[in-house]
Image (cartoon, helix red, strand yellow):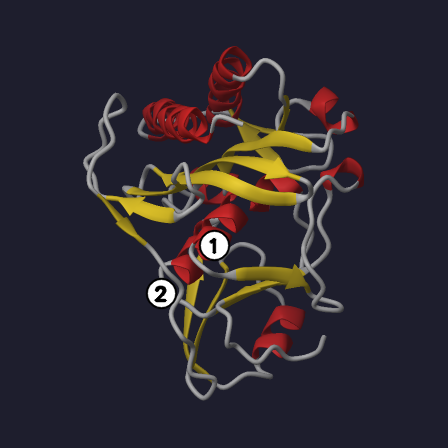
Amino acid sequence: MDYNKMATVFRTLALEAGDIIMDIYNADDFEVKSKSDDSPVTAADEAADAHISAGLAAAFPDILVVTEEQAASHTESAKDFIIVDPLDGTKEFIKRRGDFTVNIALVENGTPTRGVVYAPAKGRLFFTDADGVSVEEKGPFDVSKQGLTRPISVKTPDNSSLVVVASKSHRDQATDDYINKYDVADMTGAGSSLKFCLVATGEADLYPRLGRTMEWDTAAGDAVLRGAGGMVVRFDDHTPFTYGKPIYENPFFIAYAPGVSLKSA
């Protein structure tokens, strides 16, 4: 696997897709449609998906690409594959709240090892370098040239004073009940895969998700978190969180900084 090429291509495609998304985001209006599962989809999702898919097919023709917006890809499987959510946080996009991201990840043997998460409205770009180490690049961003980066790392948590991040659009009582098992000093909300990145940078310690997600929702953020020293486990039994599951559907999970004393489900 050419990880240098992969890091460059992932970054470039994420930035280009971000530009496409922001052109639609900044328009006076845009159409919102419903998919078969009643989740929303916009022209931005579809245009970003088409751009990323074409770029990945050209750069890595021998690697399976699974994307949220191309249902046919959901029935294929491979040991190693690239998985894409071209616009994670569509509800945040529709409400113009800015917490949406472009996500591209490489999964190897069930583990996301390389990934990029780009939040174009927030001006934040996180990715794993060729060695799998996670960094954040400082903007403004140049598609053709990488700017200054800083390594990111989870912080050592204080279990008597944790910072927890939870979903803005999918928060429920079960999530709150679980969070209440911890000694929480501060709560923060974020949309999309940014929640993984907040743990990866040490801005939060813990992100529990008690709701349905798909692998394209989580893989890139998971890769960034792992590359920053963090972990993701299943919610029910705290076993390793894996990818390449049937229909690419996830169980509930917990993303956290090592040192957090995880509570039982």
Dot 2 falls on a residue whose secondary structure is: loop
Which residue in the structure is indicated by mark 2? Answer: 203
| Point 47% across, 84% down: residue | 159
Report which residue position mark 1 lands on. Answer: 225
Q: Residues within 10 Å of mark 1 (few under 14, many from 20)?
A: many
Which residue is found at the position 71% from the left and 49% from the top? 250
In this image, 53 relative to 213: left or right? left
Q: Position of residue 162 (x, y in %)?
A: 44, 79
User: Image quadrant for the C terminus?
Assistant: bottom right
Which x, y percent locates residue 13? 41, 24
Is label 1 or label 2 in front? 1
The label on residue 122 is: none
Question: As drawn, is 204 to the left or to the right of 248?
Answer: left
Q: Residue furthest top?
A: 58
Quadrant of the rendering where the N terminus is positioned? top right
- Please say if 89 is above or below 6: below
Towards the viewer: 219 or 19? 219
Closer to us: 240 or 130? 130
x and y percent of residue 11 in the render? 37, 30
Question: In screen coordinates, is 221 left or right of 111?
Answer: left
Earlier residue among tags 1 and 2? 2
Give the residue drawn at x 25%, y 21%.
144
Characterize the local packing of mark 2: few (<14), some (14-19) or many (20 or more) Cα atoms within 10 angstroms.
some
Tag 1–tag 2 contact (CB < 8 Å): no
Q: What amino acid is at disc 2?
A: Glu
Considering only vertical position in the picture, is 211 above or below 82?
A: below
Q: Position of residue 209 (x, y in %)?
A: 61, 61
Q: CA distance from mark 1 to mark 2?
A: 12 Å
Is residue 148 found left or right of 231 in the rendered image? Answer: left
Nearest to the observer: residue 9 or residue 53: 9
Please name the amino acid that badge 1 sits on: Leu
